[in-house]
Amino acid sequence: MALALPAAVFTALLFLLPVIILLSEAFAVDGEWSLQGYVDFATTPLNQTVFLRTLKLGFLVAFTSAIIGYACAFCIVNLEGKSRGRIFGLVVLPLMISPVARTYAWIVILGRTGIVNDTIVGLGLSDTPIRILFTETAVFIGLLQLFLPLMIISLVSSMENLPRDVISAARVLGANWVQVFTKVILPLTKDGLVMGGTLVFTGSLTAYITPAILGGSRVLMLETLLYQRVNVANDFVSAGVIATILIVMCFAANLLLKRIAKARS
Amino acid sequence: MKNTLAVAAACSLIAGVASAQDETLTISVYAFGVDAMSEAIFTPFEEVCGCEVVIETGNSVERMAKIEVNAADPLIDVAVMSTQDALQLAEQGLLQPLDVSRISSYDDLYPSAQDPIGNHHALGYGFYATSIVYRSDLVEIDSWNDLFSDELRGRVALPNITGTQGPLTLYMLERARGGDDLGFEATIDAIGAHGDDFVTFYSRSSELAQLMMQEEVIAAPAGRFAWSRFAGAELPFAWAEPEEGQAGGMNVITMTAGNGNEDLAYQFIDYWLSTEVQTRVAEAGLDSPANMRVDLAPEVAEPLTYGADLINSLNMIAPADIIANRDAWLERWNENVLN
């Protein structure tokens, strides 16, 4: 216990204290302690819209990445030797590229003259290019591409510990593939799902570059709203409120996922 | 925040002492084009004054906050900014009135640049026009109202209200719609009603340039200072001259109150506003001159906001009106356009 003291003091001074100082700004209105900053934030329609949009996109990205992640992870763990390493390397590769570069690439891809619109018009699905940039769809696509690797990595590491026999056993005993997934794979890989879900959800909530570039001011999310409050309005009270809300949302998501996982087991 | 301010104040105290000892002039400038500005103004001035010029950059909010935090012992001696930011600082007592008898080229400045915010708290050093950049092969722009036309639906970007171009755009749209309400209520509501027709509300001219280069946007209001991004492009861009006229703004140079470095600051302001330096800055394409005696070749003047006829025709919003209305603009914009 005594040996851990220096580390505890170090952590408290360098990590906890700055966070506490930052968050205390949200309670200091005109030099006095007050909850007015939270009341003002909660009663402003734009803030409500931004909060719900952030929550919605975070959930959608986490949910979609879980679906795609399970499919990818299942394929990867069933590959042998070099193929497995190569495919896993491809999954990890985007993480080595700057999010700024990745997001700017989406501007080209999703633009009016980009490959997506060329395909849509080429297939006759629309007469004219459709607007994807600066919509929630663009932000969703950008965030999904950004965080999907984290979900896949979490699920692959979890599935690697899954005995292969259990799936065969379930099939022999008459379970269909849906039952195999819900009754066998899901319960045995829930730790990976909780880990991946937390990373993807919290990452989506706190991402700045992707919503800023692909959503702009039309599709504000909490993180881009926070930036505006500080850099445009010099409003540190609102910024502190938003920072607190983001931290609470991240912890709440983690606790919720853990609780769901525990309830299932 | 208070702790941060205390540390910043302590740093400024140390920096202030060092400043007096070393004949240093600290200037707060916009973050873009600093290297080119150094080459045209700051480095040559160091040779003239035999002093060191320290450059502080950042966005407007950061730079104003730095002046406010260090009010007791200013870290910044000279600052350039928009007229409304200068007026706000002057009203807080953070700027000192300038003794214009110490500015040798004062009489050479355009009248509107000689006392733009009152009490000689600032002098204009550069103008910019705001109009509409558009694809001349695809559309024709004759009026600010054309931004709402069916032909341009889904192909227009507007500047965000939080930047300097946003209010100027609203000002011209309000006039084009026949109104004269500085609250811009009907115009903001109209933009909100057509919200999906606008591609985005951009914050930086570089962002707009990219969107126009990849043909996402084909018309957008922009400051003339951004014109160089479009003028040399392969796509045919044009600068509109709408029937309602062009909007405009001015950047000003100011001196912080009680900085203790007034002699050097006056020397610098005098230097920047001189015909020689204003010409050099204009020829480098960095700023449009506020000095009437600057004589530019047509090809140099083309991308700038240059000439008495143009400058006197610009529709500008009084800085006091911007300060009085901007909170209401932002609130209505957030409610009716972004929400």
Image (cartoon, coloured by chain):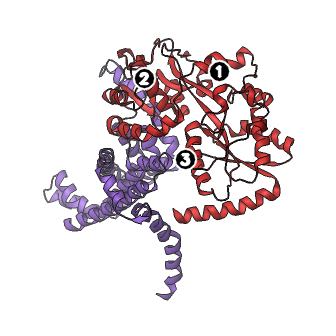
Chain colours: A purple, B red
In the rendered image, residue A4, in percent from the top left (x then y), is placed at 49, 83
Q: Which residue is mark 1?
A: B303
Q: Is residue A210 above or below residue A167?
A: above
Label 2: element kind:
helix
Task: Assess disc 2: are there few (<14), some (14-19) or many (≥20) residues with their C-alpha within 10 Å of its C-alpha.
Answer: many
Nearest to the observer: residue B247 or residue B117: B117
Task: Assess disc 1: are there few (<14), some (14-19) or many (≥20) residues with their C-alpha within 10 Å of its C-alpha.
Answer: some
Q: Is residue A40 above or below residue A256?
A: above
Q: Which residue is mark 3?
A: B61
First reached walking from the N terminus: tag 3 or tag 2: 3
Q: Which residue is mark 2?
A: B173
Q: Tell us which disc is closer to us: 1 or 2.
A: 2
Residue at screen point 63% across, 24% down:
B228
First reached walking from the N terminus: tag 3 or tag 1: 3
The alpha-carbon separation of the residues under discs 3 and 2 comes to 27 Å
Residue type, mark 1 in image: Pro
In the rendered image, residue B299, in percent from the top left (x then y), is placed at 71, 16
Residue B329 visible, this angle: yes
Label 1: element kind:
loop
In the rendered image, residue B205, in percent from the top left (x then y), is placed at 54, 31
Residue type, mark 3 in image: Val
Label 3: element kind:
helix
Q: Is residue A198 left or right of residue B322?
A: left
Nearest to the observer: residue A59 or residue A181: A59
Q: Quadrant of the C terminus of chain B?
A: top left
In the rendered image, residue B61, in percent from the top left (x then y), is placed at 54, 47
Q: Is residue A23 above or below residue B330?
A: below
First reached walking from the N terminus: tag 1 or tag 2: 2
